[in-house]
């Protein structure tokens, strides 16, 4: 794991501190027993001073070491968690968008709950294991020095409680533990689904059924939790039993040893009381074993996200971006989506020179968006290549390619922040008037000026507080602000009323004059202005050329145009 | 500081009262520790001072083993009771929270953050575990156990009892002092955890957009900063929690040391027997332990208490007054002088007046932002108008039985939500009992059957939250199939042909034409092809000084002719 190296020294310190705290606790008990027994022999007080001081020291030491151990261990674990979250994000960043088949509710559950479960892995599995082991061995040796048979008995008791009981606990609850995390994930997905689809579920009358389904998942989770609680109970019960039996056994051995004078009577209290405290070292281990199972599964699920194959191979040593990225050439491009068999795109070739504007038209599913994905290096082509100024795009850093080729998508994400922050995403350093110029180009400036809080208006989650058209225009303004040399517009006028859409298309074509543009659309209005029209069908180019040529001949474009005309005719 | 016991939580604990009581009883059975102490003391005294042989002490050894078995049983049952005490309350609260959140409706929900509520309903509720299973039983034990043990110590040695009685109150005193400081931090901590997950979700969902603008890598730093802030905050909270348990432990250690010193001195001068000395020494820490544990469990359950406060905030939000009047059949819907404004924004609708006649297709057009979707939301009862009225057959909408009103309506929102599950499950939303044939028929009517059948498992293909794996147009048509299958008299369609290309649009327009037969349809549209289906067209202007209702079958001059149907 990424975080291992930076966590190990801190965890080592924490284990040592934990062992010291435990050791103090046991020494305190043993010494107190001795002290009282010795005191009962009524020696001069001076003989007892050492032991009295020792009792105080161990008492204070126990608290101090425990305090230090907790601080050090929590700090180490939280630090490791921050690093883990970041490394998970960094990984997701490489996978998005093509390889992220995980649902967002599930992602949320995974990254918050699973990462927390990994925190337990360190705090509640590794730490108790290490300090328990160290203290258990030392106590056994010490007691064995006083009375070998008692030492052996204690060793046996500790082994049973620290190894056999945890193993039993794991065996009993393994299935339940394994199923807990996925069930929890399902619950989260169902809750997120419920909350994001409340409106539709209400109208459809499906709300009660959905709530019942969540209750059922909840009940299943409860059954699994009951199973692990029963196991935890079994573990703590068995450890308590073993503690009592060991104390009884050691007392019996001690009494015998005192009887035949192989041990001094003062030691009897030590022999009986030490095991009582020593089991503190293993009391947490059955739980720790269960935690281990749970956290390993969580780690597996985190790994499932992070170890998915990357959809795009970034070059190990990327070439610098050529000074002039043009011409941008696409040759014989073919692509297949991960997990699919049929080609989404086959043998497509295009060429962009500065200022050249190409429109790609075709039915939904014809491969238009796949083309955009390839050009943005979100997807690796199956065959063919894209070159920028003669350099193969696969030899360039993906982020460099995206400095040249940008996108305004129909489903562009609007962040839960202010209008200004959403715009500044494109260019963090841009001036106020540039923001307004971009808004004006997207015809959003009048609206924005009318807002009581202007550019500081919060747009809500997924831009829920602004209308669909405004969201789209905001995305457009953002793309224009970024000033990409080659801009891909993926259905920019979608969600807009016809008049505004056509006006926007006209504005767009004006705004992109002199800028290389790929316009993805299904509406033909205004396409006279572009340099080339490419008609896609099932991933293949079925027709290409300038409007003036294509409109004349019988073919796919003409048929599309006639259909659109028939529809538009209704308006006249 | 949060009250140590939230009465609202106790009310919800009805289902588990038995188990809470059982937890307390089992805690009392912890008195077996007294028996253990007595037996150990007897054994030591017997072996050391009286030089008893093993067989003379066998009864005591047997009893000690028996007491151990008893303690083991108690430990096992304690875990079971603890789980049962928390489990039912958690499920109850989770169900109540979600029911109330959804009952308050999308209007209320859109202002709340989805991620925050989801976290509250999952992790927030789980955080109550410690509260119910550990803290509450311990609270009862903390009152009973010290009193009982103190009585035992008093009988054994009054001086030790006096020392313990004098030092014992220091523990709750310090607990209160420290608790005051912790609570506020915990509240803040809980909120920052909710923000953390919301922020993470927003960033992950926006990853493609971030990548386009070259900001994705920089966000890694933000994620790290946000989690680092969380760590710093958590450490501050934990430090207080640890200092408090350190203080409490130190207090009890010092108190026990006082007892031990006084015992030791009196043992030396023969004022106390070894048996009583041992007994008191083993019991003394046990007097402090339950009180200290209250402190520990309180810290563990504060997160739960903070979450509970947020849960109750939702649960105590009153539901909007529900209407009860039956829904008139075949009635016209009249909208008069309707005015709606966003909470923190410009007006969404101003002075709108129109009539929706039964069996007719009414189209709403107008520039984006004019409030077409807002009007649909008002018709659905999700948005309350600031002024003006909506009436169905003369009955104000607010007085209608909501569920009954919704049973009349099939609605296609602008951005339909597809739920985790199969395509068929999604289509069956309003009619869960519909068979596969009906689902196929609905998909066919929505012109979606073709692509659905080409999916790997046909109509049983699983699609995810947000419908990943389907294109915008495909999502739209699956959602339209829902409307067909729902088969309800009033149909509200918000941009049904958005996201569609020419060929699909024509298909959907045909479908809507079929849908309109015998139904009242209200649709918002930008596309002329759809408007051609409309019997009446209203153009809603941008909210501004001049309202322009055009309630005329002929539609605004030059924009639209009246049309009988789309076929």
Image (tube, coloured by chain):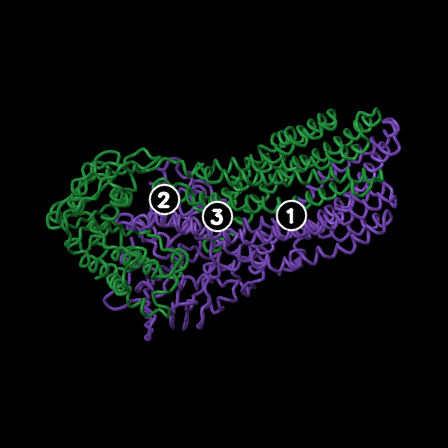
Chain colours: A green, B purple
Image coords of residue A43 (percent x, y)? 83, 39
Asked if disc 2 and disc 1 are in contact, CB closer than 8 Å, the reply is no
Closer-to-camera residue (B20/A289): A289
Image coords of residue B325 (percent x, y)? 54, 65
Mark before the other along the chain sequence, 1 or 3: 1
- Residue B86 circle label: 1
Asked if disc 3 and disc 2 are in contact, CB closer than 8 Å, the reply is no
Q: Give the crowd class for mark 1: few <14, some 14-19, many >=20 residues within 10 Å.
A: many
Residue that carries the numbered disc 3 in the rendered image: B431
Q: CA distance from mark 3 to mark 2?
A: 40 Å
Could you tell me which chain the residue with mark 1 belongs to? B
The residue furthest bottom is B545
Q: Give the crowd class for mark 3: few <14, some 14-19, many >=20 residues within 10 Å.
A: some
Q: Is residue A219 left or right of residue A273?
A: left
Q: Give the crowd class for mark 2: few <14, some 14-19, many >=20 residues within 10 Å.
A: many
Task: Indicate the secondary structure of the residue bearing disc 3.
Answer: loop
Q: CA distance from mark 2 to mark 1?
A: 39 Å
Q: Nearer the viewer, mark 3 or mark 2?
A: 2
Q: Is residue B54 left or right of residue A530?
A: right
Could you tell me which chain the residue with mark 2 belongs to? A
Task: Indicate the secondary structure of the residue bearing disc 1.
Answer: helix
Same chain for labels 1 and 3? Say yes or no: yes
Image coords of residue B150 (percent x, y)? 81, 50
Image coords of residue B535 (percent x, y)? 33, 62
Closer-to-camera residue (A437/B284): B284
Residue that carries the numbered disc 2 in the rendered image: A93
């Amino acid at each position: 794991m990424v975080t291992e190296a930076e966590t190990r020294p801190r965890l080592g310190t924490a284990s040592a501190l934990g062992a010291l705290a435990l050791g103090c606790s046991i020494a305190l008990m043993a010494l107190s027993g001795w002290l009282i027994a010795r005191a009962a022999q009524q020696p001069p007080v001076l003989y007892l001073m050492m032991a009295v001081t020792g009792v105080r020291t161990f008492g204070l030491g126990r608290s101090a070491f425990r305090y230090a151990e907790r601080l050090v261990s929590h700090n180490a674990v939280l630090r490791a968690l921050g690093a883990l979250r970041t490394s998970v994000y960094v990984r997701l960043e490489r996978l998005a968008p093509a390889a992220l088949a995980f649902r967002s509710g599930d992602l949320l559950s995974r990254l918050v709950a699973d990462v927390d479960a990994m925190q337990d892995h360190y705090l509640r599995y590794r730490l108790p294991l290490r300090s328990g082991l160290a203290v258990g061995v030392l106590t056994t040796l010490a007691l064995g020095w006083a009375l070998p048979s008692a030492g052996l008995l204690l060793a046996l008791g500790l082994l049973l409680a620290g190894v056999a009981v945890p193993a039993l606990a794991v065996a009993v609850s393994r299935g339940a533990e394994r199923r807990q995390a996925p069930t929890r994930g399902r619950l989260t997905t169902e809750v997120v689904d419920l909350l994001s689809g409340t409106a539709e579920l209400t109208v459809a009358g499906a709300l009660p059924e959905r709530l019942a389904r969540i209750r059922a998942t909840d009940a299943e989770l409860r059954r699994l939790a009951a199973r692990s609680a029963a196991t935890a109970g079994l573990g703590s019960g068995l450890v308590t039993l073993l503690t009592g039996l060991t104390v009884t056994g050691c007392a019996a051995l001690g009494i015998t040893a005192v009887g035949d004078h192989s041990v001094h009577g003062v030691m009897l209290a030590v022999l009986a009381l030490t095991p009582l405290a020593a089991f503190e070292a293993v009391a947490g281990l059955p739980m720790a074993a269960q935690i281990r199972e749970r956290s390993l599964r969580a780690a597996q699920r985190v790994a499932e996200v992070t170890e998915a194959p990357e959809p795009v191979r970034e070059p190990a040593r990327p070439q610098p971006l050529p000074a002039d990225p043009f011409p941008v050439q696409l040759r014989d491009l073919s692509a297949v989506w991960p997990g699919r068999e049929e080609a989404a795109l086959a043998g497509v070739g295009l060429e962009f020179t500065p200022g050249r504007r190409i429109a790609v038209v075709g039915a939904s599913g014809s491969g238009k968006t796949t083309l955009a994905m390839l050009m943005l290096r979100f997807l690796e082509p199956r065959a063919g290549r894209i070159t920028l100024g003669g350099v193969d795009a696969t030899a360039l850093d993906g982020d460099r390619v995206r400095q040249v080729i940008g996108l305004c998508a129909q489903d562009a994400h609007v962040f839960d922040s202010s209008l200004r922050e959403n715009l500044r995403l494109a260019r963090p350093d841009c001036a106020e008037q540039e923001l307004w110029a971009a808004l004006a180009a997207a015809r959003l400036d009048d609206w924005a000026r009318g807002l009581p809080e202007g550019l500081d208006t919060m747009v809500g989650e997924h831009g829920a507080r602004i209308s669909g058209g405004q969201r789209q225009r905001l995305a457009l303004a953002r793309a224009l602000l970024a000033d990409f040399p080659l801009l891909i517009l993926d259905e920019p006028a979608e969600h807009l009323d016809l008049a505004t859409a056509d006006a926007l298309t006209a504005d767009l074509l004006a705004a992109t004059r002199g800028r290389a543009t790929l316009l993805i659309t299904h509406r033909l209005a205004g396409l006279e202005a572009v340099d080339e029209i490419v008609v896609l069908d099932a991933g293949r180019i079925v027709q290409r050329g300038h409007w003036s040529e294509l409109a004349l001949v019988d073919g796919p474009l003409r048929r599309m145009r006639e259909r659109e005309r028939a529809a538009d005719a209704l308006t006249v | 500081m949060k009250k140590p016991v939230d009465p609202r939580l106790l009310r919800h604990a009805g289902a588990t009262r038995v188990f809470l009581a059982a937890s307390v009883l089992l805690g009392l059975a912890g008195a077996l520790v007294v028996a253990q102490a007595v037996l150990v003391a007897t054994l030591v005294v017997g072996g050391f001072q009286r030089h008893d042989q093993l067989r003379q002490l066998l009864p005591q050894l047997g009893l000690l083993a028996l007491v151990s078995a008893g303690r083991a049983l108690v430990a096992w049952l304690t875990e079971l009771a603890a789980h049962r005490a928390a489990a039912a309350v958690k499920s109850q609260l989770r169900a109540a929270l979600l029911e109330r959140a959804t009952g308050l409706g999308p209007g209320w929900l859109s202002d709340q953050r989805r991620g925050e509520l989801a976290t509250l309903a999952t992790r927030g509720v789980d955080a109550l575990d410690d509260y119910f299973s550990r803290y509450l039983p311990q609270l009862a034990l903390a009152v009973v156990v010290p009193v009982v043990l103190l009585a035992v110590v008093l009988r054994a040695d009054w001086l030790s009892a006096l020392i313990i009685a004098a030092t014992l109150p220091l523990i709750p005193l310090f607990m209160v002092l420290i608790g005051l400081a912790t609570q506020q931090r915990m509240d803040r901590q809980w909120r920052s955890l909710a923000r953390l997950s919301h922020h993470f979700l927003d960033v992950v969902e926006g990853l493609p957009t971030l990548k386009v603008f070259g900001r994705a890598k920089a966000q890694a730093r933000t994620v790290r900063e946000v989690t680092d802030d969380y760590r710093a905050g958590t450490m501050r909270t934990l430090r207080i929690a640890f200092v408090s348990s350190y203080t409490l432990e130190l207090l009890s250690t010092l108190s026990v040391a006082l007892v031990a010193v006084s015992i030791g001195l009196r043992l030396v001068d023969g004022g106390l027997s070894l048996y009583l000395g041992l007994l008191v020494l083993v019991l003394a820490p046990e007097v402090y332990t339950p009180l200290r544990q209250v402190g520990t469990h309180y810290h563990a359950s504060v997160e739960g208490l903070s979450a509970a406060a947020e849960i109750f905030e939702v649960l105590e939000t009153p539901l909007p007054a529900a209407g009860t009047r039956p829904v008139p059949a075949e009635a016209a819907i009249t909208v008069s002088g309707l005015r709606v404004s966003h909470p923190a924004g410009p007006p969404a609708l101003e002075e709108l007046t129109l009539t929706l006649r039964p069996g007719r297709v009414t189209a709403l057009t107008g520039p984006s932002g004019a409030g077409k979707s807002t009007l649909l939301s008002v018709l659905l009862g999700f948005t309350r108008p600031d002024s003006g009225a909506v009436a169905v057959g003369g009955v104000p909408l607010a007085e209608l039985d909501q569920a009954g009103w919704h049973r009349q309506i099939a609605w296609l929102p602008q951005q339909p939500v597809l739920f985790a599950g199969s395509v068929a499950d999604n289509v069956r939303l309003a009619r869960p009992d519909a068979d596969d044939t009906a689902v196929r028929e609905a998909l066919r009517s929505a012109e979606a059957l073709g692509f659905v059948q080409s999916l790997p498992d046909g109509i049983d293909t699983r699609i995810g939250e947000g419908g990943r794996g389907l294109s915008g147009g495909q999502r739209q048509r699956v959602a339209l199939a829902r409307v067909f299958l729902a088969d309800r008299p009033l149909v509200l369609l918000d941009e049904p042909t958005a996201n569609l290309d020419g060929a699909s649009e024509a298909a959907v327009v045909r479908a809507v034409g079929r849908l309109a037969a015998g139904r009242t349809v209200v649709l918002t549209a930008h596309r002329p092809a759809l408007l051609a289906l409309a019997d009446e067209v209203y153009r809603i202007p941008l909210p501004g000084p001049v309202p322009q209702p055009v309630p005329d079958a002929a539609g605004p001059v030059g924009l639209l002719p009246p049309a009988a149907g789309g076929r």
